[in-house]
Image: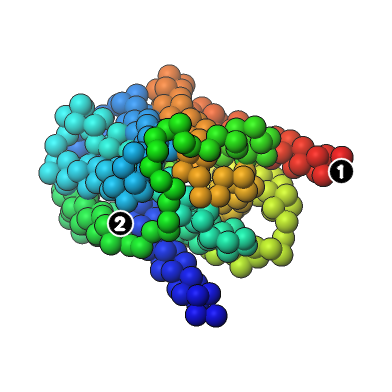
Amino acid sequence: MNTQASEQRRENQLLYCVLFAFFVSGAASQPLGSFIPFLRDTYGLSYDLSGVLLSCQSVGNLLAVLLAGFLPLWLGRRRAVLLTAVWMTVAYLIFAAGLGSAPLLVAAFLMTGVARGGNSNFSNTMISTLPGERAAQGYNLLHGAFAVGALLSPILLVVCAGRWPAFGWRLVAGVLCLVCVSQLVVYAKMPLPEEPPRKGVRSADHSFLKVKQFWLGSAMLLFYISAEYAIVGWLVTYFQDTGVLDASWSQLMNSLLWLVIFIGRMVGAAITGRVSRSKLLLLDGAGFFACFLVMFFSRTPLPIILGLVGVGLFMATIYPTAFAFGSDCIRGNDLGCSVMIFTGSVGGIITPFLVGQVAERAGIQAGMGVVAALTALLLVSIVLSVWSVRRAKAE
């Protein structure tokens, strides 16, 4: 009994530390789309360069996800996550200092991506070590904590930019830099589960590569991440430049999106085990597609905001549910989590850049049309995944 209670305390402590770390990751990595209008105004950035910056975050994320599968085998989990997470602090130092040359901004956005990728792989691997349904619940809580951070930082940005128009955004960058330092402290001190002996890359378990369900989950993540990164990165610019919402309302839309996502993820954590993954994924995929089309084709504030609320609600549980769907065969496997996140993150590189390229040549409305197509592809991938799993069970 004492052993069971001690193990439960260890699991709770691990969960709380990971939730805080992922909250910080959400607060620091998600507001970059909201920073883009300030960077464009301050440094005269084009749509092309803005799209490149957003894609640079995805490139950094992808590089970190690749490395995160192997670094724990060489350095151990704690040193590995500290090595990647520290770059978020450095990036926000660059923003706060007002260093606006294109090479430095590119480097800073790459750094945020490296930190985000390292945080994501570490946190998802830690949650995967929890037993049974607790892991599925943990994924929703984890991404709910991320949503809280992503919700609060754009609000802080709006408040500070309104109070101090000349330097408010740089003040927020300084605050986020300090928050990132607190994340490093948690990583340095939190208890970690026992990890396999460090024997190098050859000792890694690759068996998951032969499991179809792993690749189905990865495909859903690919299209979801593509759509999410494009929406979050370009949402504020899209509303401002099309004129369908004024500047202050446009900035608040990111926070509204993440508020709804947070609520949806808390609901997802509560219904874990009561609603099947397949039903939840089908509902989410269809709802996400329909609500994005409402937002995309509307030209007045009310249907736009209602559509955005629907987008956030149905987005909320797609990532954690798809990840849980594909991760049954990679519990506690750093490399397996890395490959799954890597596969999903590929779209995060291509899509923001593609939206920027299309927007530069045909307008921001056409650029966001790319995202509409991605929501359709996500729905198709969900339907194929659910059908494939049901067919396998029937056989």
Q: Amino acid at mark 2?
A: Tyr
Residue at image position (54%, 29%) is 370
Tag 2 residue: 187
Residue at the far bottom in the pictured view: 1
Residue at point 34%, 27% (across, down): 52
- Kindly give the residue lying farthest to the top in the view shown: 361
* Helix, strand or loop at mark 1: helix
Nearest the camera: 6 or 390?
6
Let me know if residue 181 appears in the view: yes
Instruction: Indicate the position of residue 303 as horizontal and vertical percent values.
Output: 58, 51
Which residue reaches farthest right?
A: 395
- Viewport quadrant of the C terminus: top right
The Cα atoms of the two marked residues, 1 and 2, are separated by: 45 Å
Q: Quadrant of residue 252?
A: bottom left
| The disc label shown at residue 394, or none | 1
Foreground pick, 146 / 38: 146
Q: Position of residue 267 (x, y in %)?
A: 59, 65
